[in-house]
Amino acid sequence: MSDTRRNASESENTNDEVVQRVTFKLDNETYGINVMQVQEILRYTEIAPVPGAPVYVMGIINLRGNVVTVIDTRARFGMESAELTDNTRIVIIEAETQVIGILVDSVAEVVYLKSSEIDVAPNVGNDESAKYIQGVSNRDGELLILVDLNKLLSDVEWDELKQF
Amino acid sequence: MSKSLAASKQLMQTYLSELLTEEEVAQKSLLVKEKQSKPLEKLLLSATFPQLAEQGTAEKLSSTKAQNKSLVKEQAVTNTVTKPTTKLRQAKIEPEVNERTRIENPAQVAQSELTTRKSQGGFEPIKQRSYRQGDFQAMFFDVAGLTIAVPLIELGGIINHDKTTPLMGKPDWFKGVMLNRDNKVNVVDTARWVMPEKCDPTLLSTLNYQYIIMLSDSSWGLTAENLIDTVTLKQDQVKWLDAPSKRPWLAGLVKNRMCALLDVKSLIQLLEQGANAKNN
């Protein structure tokens, strides 16, 4: 291999960053979030509702003495609510310098994804929830929808959460 | 079963009648414009007098007098009345006449409307399509009782309908992303895209999508219930919609089958813009 070719392939490899993603299920679809933003994954515990809280807030939980706000992910993604099962989990994430929990149907696995394996989702639809999608990727014949956790809430909503 | 077939046929007929009436509507609007422009033309004709007066050509006036005796008396009267105030009247009328001639030239208005409608969306005229010369092959498929034709030259492929992954926040006509040989296909719910107003829960429950019709070399695919056949069409077998229309995705109507012929390039453009058949 010539030097120029080797350099080109090396730079390609460095640009093709590998990111680990935690995958979870919602309504039989698989979603992926950056593992670096995941702090821990909890079994479902009782979520205490907060009077006057925004609609996207399910309530709060006590996590080793800290109050963590839990977001209704299904509602946020425009899905109908589902019954809680043994597989229901609360994923504690850090986004926009805040720690929050997101309720998911189940957590699947941790996958390694190259940047080159991620495709941009078609830019159609003006719905708010369309902006949460970072891209889509083919994993063993199944599509993985990558979620941008920082965009899960708007700036105003992140500010609102700070007050909890 | 027979009821649903009858309902589908009725639905298709209604839809096609709507497609066919579009041109009539356009023609009507042109007729209305013509009618509207007629009184304006009259006004313009009547407004030409001050222009003539402005020129102050006695010779021209006398020549008209010679041509039409009935006008002689009137003009003689007006001339006698207007003579002392000609300059004042000229000053008042002149701008009015200019404005009207500038705005109300019907040919110009029609021309400007015709050129802007389609060019606004950046759609290429159908006349420039390769299948607009000589015979061409088209494939027919149906969706919810509606038959649609697509020129074979613009057909990217046909694949079996498989599991689609819906994406949140997308319009309801966007069925989702489907994997086909490691390629991602953006699947369009054709019924919802073409005739959203007719997609009630009853109709949607009867839909049985089996195929995806890939559009040219794009990643967009239209869902189809059945593939009918492929035929070679002559140019005169299609009622071409070369004039700009509200439906840039419609290249024309196949006369003997009374069905829509898709303009694939414009359709792809519309899909990329996130528009459906009704809100483009």
Image (cartoon, coloured by chain):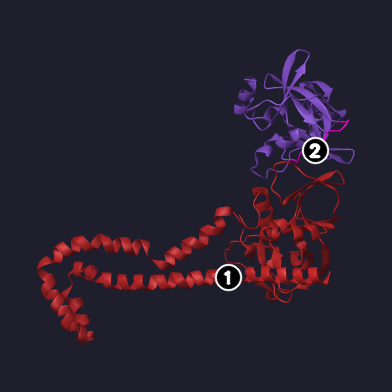
Q: Is residue B245 above or below residue A76?
A: below
Give the crowd class for mark 1: few <14, some 14-19, many >=20 residues within 10 Å.
Answer: some
Colour chain A is painted in = purple
Magenta segment: A79-87
Chain in red in the render: B
Q: Please identify the quarter of the rendering in which residue B134 is found.
A: bottom right
Badge 2 and badge 1 both on one subunit? no
* Magenta stretch secondary structure, dominant: loop
Q: In front of the other: label 2 or label 1?
A: 2
Amino acid at pointer 2: Ala
Name the element at disc 2. loop
Determine the chain carrying the residue at label 2.
A
The number of numbered discs placed on residues in the rendered structure image is 2
Number of the label disc, if any, that sits on residue A82:
2
Determine the chain carrying the residue at label 1.
B
Distance (Cα) linking label 2 and label 1 = 49 Å
Residue B107 point in image, percent of width and height: 43, 68
Q: Is residue B256 above or below residue A2?
A: below
B183 and B22: which one is in front?
A: B22
Amino acid at pointer 1: Glu
Residue B103 point in image, percent of width and height: 37, 61
- Quadrant containing the N terminus of chain A is top right
| Image point (21%, 86%), residue name | B70
User: Would you say residue B102 sits in the magenta stretch?
Assistant: no
| Image point (82%, 68%), residue name | B228
Judge left or right: residue A150 versus residue B225.
Answer: left
User: Which residue carries the number 1 mark?
Assistant: B23
Give the crowd class for mark 2: few <14, some 14-19, many >=20 residues within 10 Å.
Answer: few
Mark yes or no: residue B99 visible: yes
- Quadrant containing the C terminus of chain A is top right
Number of the label disc, if any, that sits on residue A41:
none
